[in-house]
Image (cartoon, coloured by chain):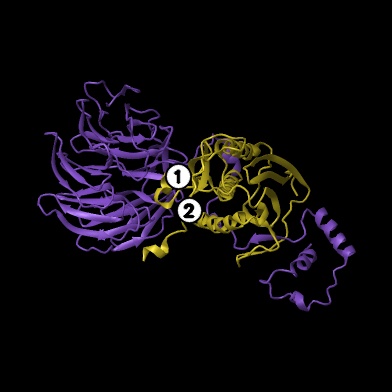
Amino acid sequence: MPASAKPPAQTTASSVAPTRSKLSLKGSSKVVAEFFEYSINSILFQRGIYPPEDFQVVKKYGLNMLITVDEEVKSYIRRIMSQLNKWIIGGKISKLVVAVVALDTGDVAERWQFDIEVFSKSGGLAKTSASVAGKENAVPESGMPTKEKSVDEIQSEIQAIIRQITASVTFLPVLEGRHTFNVLVYADGDAQVPAEWIDSDPKEVRDAEQVKLRSFSTNSHKVDTMVAYRLGTAE
Amino acid sequence: MSKLESESKSSSDSSDSLLPSISSASSYQPNTAALAYQSSVAEACGLALNTRILAFKPEAPQSSKPIDLRSQYNRPLKPAVNAQLRRRLPTSAERILDAPGIRDDYYLNLLDWSRNNQVAIGLDRDLYVWNAESGTVSNLLRTDSDTYIAGIKWSGDGAYIAVGLSDGDVQIWDVEEGEKVRSMSGHAARVGVMSWDRHILSSGCRDGSIWNHDVRVADHKISEFVNHQAEVCGLQWRSDGNQLASGGNDNLVNIWDARSSTPKFTKTNHKAAVKALAWCPWQLNLLATGGGTYDKHIHFWNGTTGARLNSIDTGSQVTSLQWSTTYKEIVSSHGYPDNNLAIWSYPSLVKNGEIQGHDTRILSSALSPDGSTVATVASDENLKFWKVFEQIGKKVSSAVSGTLGSGKDIAKVMMIR
């Protein structure tokens, strides 16, 4: 019967006037996960891992973002993201790495690293202080600006990073030949690891140049971005 | 590096069966000096002790097409989209009307557009009808002081309008005569949503019940569809009258066969109330449903098999859905946090654009009878008209033109009062 399928009710009875504009930990995790997903897609497009025809424009972060429409790649990324989502919400990963690897030699040509810092695991839990009957009328994030970060601010920080990723083509060496990508995470020892994820070496770039890009933060997370690459001299 | 990892793993990970369990590891004597050494080595390697580097084992799909990065940079970067996907959407409303006093309540359905081009809107106790062709407004009714209008719905021919009240009363009004034709009471709580199938009017109630009335007969109540455990806020008959879709504050979508009082399908995928629902005009058994604040998804269903065909994560509370009758698209209106209109192609689910037209959440939307214009009303007390679906290949004619000016007038504000 439907009653058993009901999600847990938001039960706090008091109607505290919301003065916070911050995202809950879960909302912040979603922002972080989404950022990763869009960044992975951007890297795949910018670095020519897949041809441009495989990508479609969508509006996100106030920009034209490119995401893959190839079913296989979409599904591959979806599988990765579904696990990443769990780890991020649980605060189990400290880094995400996208390694760009030459297909024929296995040589790591480029390495994008995203460092995640969690401010506090218990902070920022949004409460919907409305009864279930009116839950759609409850404001999950108040519009009152406080010194905590608004969604708009976070979005413009993310926008800046995406622009930098795009602009990185001006200094990143052209990748010769076919390349593929590997996704790595640095996970806590007590993280639950499904079978599809195995222990790995860090896939560092030999003789790397490193460029630190901008970071963004929500009230619960801070994400730093950097890219390491080898100066494009023929081996 | 891997030695470090295996030592740090041994104390916790039960998923690795190759390591001895810690209880019998008497041979492993933690030595503070050794630990300090490990920790400084770990730091030097950039690894906190007890961190694992994990790679997603399956290999990424291979692209079959040749890729030449250089050729991509040597020409201006053009995303691979067709011209037809980039059509211009209006950035400003064709017309704005004032809607003072509209109740900011997600669960109500206070806007509807009739087949004969009249827009009805419920503003608390008053029902106004705005004739889009002549531009005239009339105050059709005002409810008693202790009630308010919770739902409105035009009959198929536009001659009558059903009004659901906060006290559970359902009234039918003859709009041309300006008279109440009948009153069908009995519901135990407010009636926030209704849908017509020819002479059958279905009403959805806050207590979760749906009643079906034959408005032609004195003993109007034909049947009851009871399944929802909370307020019914979405209700729509399929155009052939064979199925009724309902959405509730219990997060359920029910698809009912007309002749059965238990639902054919009950869908639990939404994680929030389902107010937005719409049957597709060009594919008879295709149903779209939209979820509230904690869900934000649009799901697409096959009403015959019950299968979920597609889903979109829109990012905001979905407050209504309108399928286009002229384009293969669907428009969703939103509340928290974006308060916008989004236009999606179907079945590709590509977002063709969005319109940021309101400062606060859009409560309801309606489509003009010629399919060209979407009306939206928000809690910012504005009723705005958007020319989303230009008439293809024909001279653009405004659905809201009339004596008050042509479609080019942008912010013509008119008080409904």
Q: Residue at x 42, y 44 (%)?
A: A137
SS for dot 2: loop
Residue A170's spot in the image, x, y percent? 66, 36
Left or right for A218, reference B298: right
**Chain letter of disc 1 in the image:** A
Query: Mark 1 touching mark 2, by CB under 8 A?
Result: yes
Residue beneath label 2, please? A10
Q: Residue at x 23, y 29 (%)?
A: B132
Note whether residue B82 is visible.
Answer: no
Q: Residue at x 20, y 54 (%)?
A: B212
Query: Hey, what amino acid is under mark 2?
Result: Gln
Residue beneath label 1, please? A138
Asked if residue B296 is positioned above or below residue B101 in the image, the reply reads below
SS for dot 1: loop
Chain drawn purple in the picture: B
Marking on residue B134: none
Asked if residue B256 is positioned above or below residue B320 in the image, the reply reads below
**Chain letter of disc 2 in the image:** A
Residue B249's spot in the image, x, y percent? 37, 53
Indicate which disc, 1 or 2, sits on the residue closer to the N terminus.
2
Chain drawn yellow in the picture: A
In which quadrant will I find the N terminus of chain A? bottom left
Residue B81, located in which quarter of the rendered image? top left
